């Protein structure tokens, strides 16, 4: 709604109306002084034509998304510096390279396109140079939070404020400020005063200022709020939260305040500090990082794995197929292709169909049969340092049992009993759809082999927890879940279903939140059993990065299986191993058991 007749068109709260436009990249470069090198970038965009913002105010932000992009949502980035006229707007941002969305923005080049929505949110207030007592404002920035407050400082008169910049290491983003005094703190002492913001300001010192403006990490903002409250000094802080629309419609970015829920995109991002309820915010625990290498090894049903990352059945062949591309010996384990007693030719027609966030497959358990596997593929698999797991499937109870008997006579360390494959017309998923059938096949196979038995469950079962508990009672030594989710696709040109079997299995990153919920529920149910009845759970489903794997382990999984990610990134599994190692060192976890199941509440 346009509520005034000024040259600058604003909404009813006197904020410039946002625009949705495509801007062009002037430059994107590493921010000098940021540590580690390449962690922070400076991005300059130019928008021109009819979609130029009428005004950009200090403290506001834009939603940015590179073109093209592999993420769903734009990223909210505060304005560092801007110049606006009737024909064009030049806007600079300082961006912390953190996830995929920011990584994309940090990888653009001059001439590339970036979609933007903004300016959004409210702004910092321009106070007087001094108040009646001759006090100046104090501006505090922490980490990449320096950007919006430095942008605000650049709009003030020279030497009309003091500035504190706090970093873990190094410093950046201070090239446009002109404070009376500049204090830099670094955790490692690499620049300025050694220590956090607490080394530069406290409740007594803050009394010397008329007002405080701050942006940075939440623990820093909480500290600033507390010392200002203790000293009776007015304080404004810039907050952030996960955001979808940026327009105030979705209510996804609300934060709790003493005045009720407030939207960061509308009522914020700048708030009076006294209304923010920091007690409602979960702060990450602080631990000393490890000074030695963590132990990633894990034992599942008595079988040793050098790390918790296992190649999922049906995605990695028998290991040798990917040996030219990655170090297979660096993996924790390898699940063989799904095996049946007799050789299978698999399904006819289309077998793979790419879709949003994943892949639908209808392979149909094509495999050489258990006897051929034992004679030819198994000896080669056993040569790897990665632990071998034979994935056994079947269409009848008898075929499961006979396959298990043959594998029992081999050196294979573990059998993964597949009662959940959705790509065959008989058997497979049918055995895993209810507790009685699942218990029947597990019990029969349990009697046929002394090998550790890990049962692979179907996410399509109406009562997955019930099926899981029935498998444990029937003799499963471990559980793995989830297998693919039943799905379908229609070819709009052929005007018919894509797959001969109509339905097929959906896998890929889109299923991860569903798989995580199911793993969490099953682990929770198993934890309710007596200690002697509990079995480990191996997680499967959309695991692409180390953080995905860490989520499942925090949910209680002893290990993870990785499948579809290997198709688009052959080194996904070795990357996950490295990422987990770094995560454990940073968080102070010496072993996997130190954080396995910590998210169970």
Image (cartoon, rainbow, N blue to C red):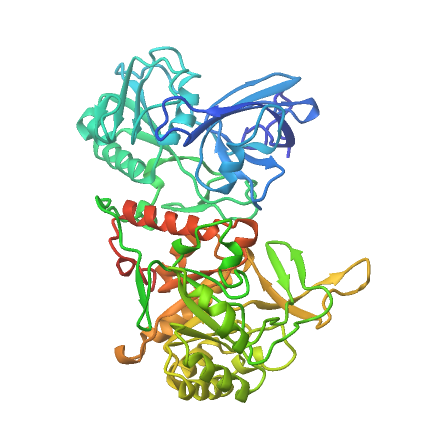
User: Which residue is depicted at the point 41% across and 81% down?
Assistant: 409
**Residue 243 percent coordinates (x, y):** 50, 44
Question: Which of the two residues, 60 or 343, is positioned nearer the viewer here?
Answer: 343
Question: Which of the two residues, 561 or 399, is positioned nearer the viewer here?
Answer: 399
Count of numbered tags: 0
Question: Which of the two residues, 323 or 106, is positioned nearer the viewer here?
Answer: 323
**Residue 432 percent coordinates (x, y):** 52, 79
User: Which residue is depicted at the point 26% across and 77% down?
Assistant: 531
Q: Is residue 295 at least partly visible in the picture?
A: yes
**Residue 99 percent coordinates (x, y):** 46, 42
Most extreme residue toward the right is 494
**Residue 249 percent coordinates (x, y):** 57, 46
Q: Quadrant of residue 199?
A: top left
Q: Is residue 216 left or right of residue 114?
A: left
Image quarter in which the N terminus is found: top right
Q: Is residue 203 left or right of residue 113?
A: left
């Amino acid at each position: 709604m346009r509520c005034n007749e000024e040259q600058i068109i604003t909404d009813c709260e006197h904020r410039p109306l946002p625009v949705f436009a495509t801007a062009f990249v002037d430059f994107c470069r590493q921010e000098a002084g940021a540590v580690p090198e390449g962690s922070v970038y400076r991005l300059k965009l130019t928008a021109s034509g009819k979609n130029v913002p009428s005004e950009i105010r200090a403290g506001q932000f834009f939603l940015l998304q590179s073109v093209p992009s592999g993420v769903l949502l734009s990223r909210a980035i505060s304005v560092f510096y801007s110049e606006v006229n009737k024909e064009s707007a030049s806007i600079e941002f300082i961006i912390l390279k953190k996830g995929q969305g920011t990584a994309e923005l940090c990888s653009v080049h001059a001439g590339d396109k970036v979609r933007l929505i903004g300016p959004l949110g409210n702004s910092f207030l321009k106070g007087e140079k001094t108040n009646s007592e001759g006090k100046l404002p104090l501006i505090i920035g922490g980490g990449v939070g320096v950007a919006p407050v430095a942008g605000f400082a650049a709009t003030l008169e020279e030497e009309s404020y003091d500035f504190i910049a706090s970093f873990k290491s190094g410093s950046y983003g201070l090239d446009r400020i002109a404070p009376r005094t500049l204090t830099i703190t670094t955790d490692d002492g690499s620049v300025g005063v050694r220590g956090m913001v607490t080394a530069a300001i406290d409740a007594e010192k803050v009394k010397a200022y008329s007002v405080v403006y701050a942006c940075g990490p939440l623990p820093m903002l909480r500290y600033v709020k507390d010392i200002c409250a203790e000293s009776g000094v007015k304080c404004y802080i810039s907050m952030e939260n996960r955001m979808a629309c940026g327009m105030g419609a979705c209510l996804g970015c609300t934060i709790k305040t003493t005045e009720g829920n407030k939207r960061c995109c509308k009522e914020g991002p700048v708030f009076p500090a006294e209304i923010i309820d920091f007690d409602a915010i979960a702060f990450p625990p602080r631990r000393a990082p490890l000074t030695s290498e963590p132990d990633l090894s894990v034992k599942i049903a008595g079988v040793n794995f050098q790390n918790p990352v296992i190649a999922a059945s049906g995605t990695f062949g028998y290991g040798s197929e990917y040996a030219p591309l990655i170090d297979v010996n660096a993996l924790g384990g390898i699940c063989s292709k799904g095996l049946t007693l007799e050789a299978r030719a698999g399904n006819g027609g289309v077998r793979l169909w790419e879709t949003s966030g994943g892949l639908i497959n209808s392979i149909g358990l094509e495999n050489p049969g258990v006897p051929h596997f034992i004679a030819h593929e198994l000896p080669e698999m056993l040569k790897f340092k990665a632990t071998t797991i034979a994935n056994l499937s079947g269409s009848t109870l008898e075929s499961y049992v006979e396959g298990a008997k043959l594998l029992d006579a081999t050196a294979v360390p573990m059998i993964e009993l597949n009662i959940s494959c959705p790509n065959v017309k008989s058997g497979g998923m049918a055995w895993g759809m209810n507790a009685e059938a699942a218990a029947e096949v597990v019990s029969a196979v349990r009697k046929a082999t002394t090998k550790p038995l890990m049962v692979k469950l179907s996410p399509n079962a109406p009562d997955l927890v019930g099926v899981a508990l029935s498998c444990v009672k029937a003799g499963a030594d471990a559980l793995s879940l989830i297998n693919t989710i039943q799905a379908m696709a229609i070819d709009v040109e052929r005007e018919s279903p894509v797959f001969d079997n109509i339905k097929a299995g959906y896998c890929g990153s889109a299923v991860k939140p569903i798989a995580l919920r199911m793993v969490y529920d099953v682990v929770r149910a198993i934890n309710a059993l007596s200690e002697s009845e509990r079995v480990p759970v191996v997680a499967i489903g959309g695991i692409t990065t180390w953080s995905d794997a860490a989520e499942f382990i925090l949910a209680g999984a002893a290990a993870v299986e990785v499948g579809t990610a290997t198709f688009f990134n052959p080194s996904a599994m070795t990357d996950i191993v490295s990422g987990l190692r770094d995560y454990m060192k940073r968080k102070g976890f010496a072993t996997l058991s130190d954080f396995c199941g910590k998210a169970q509440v």
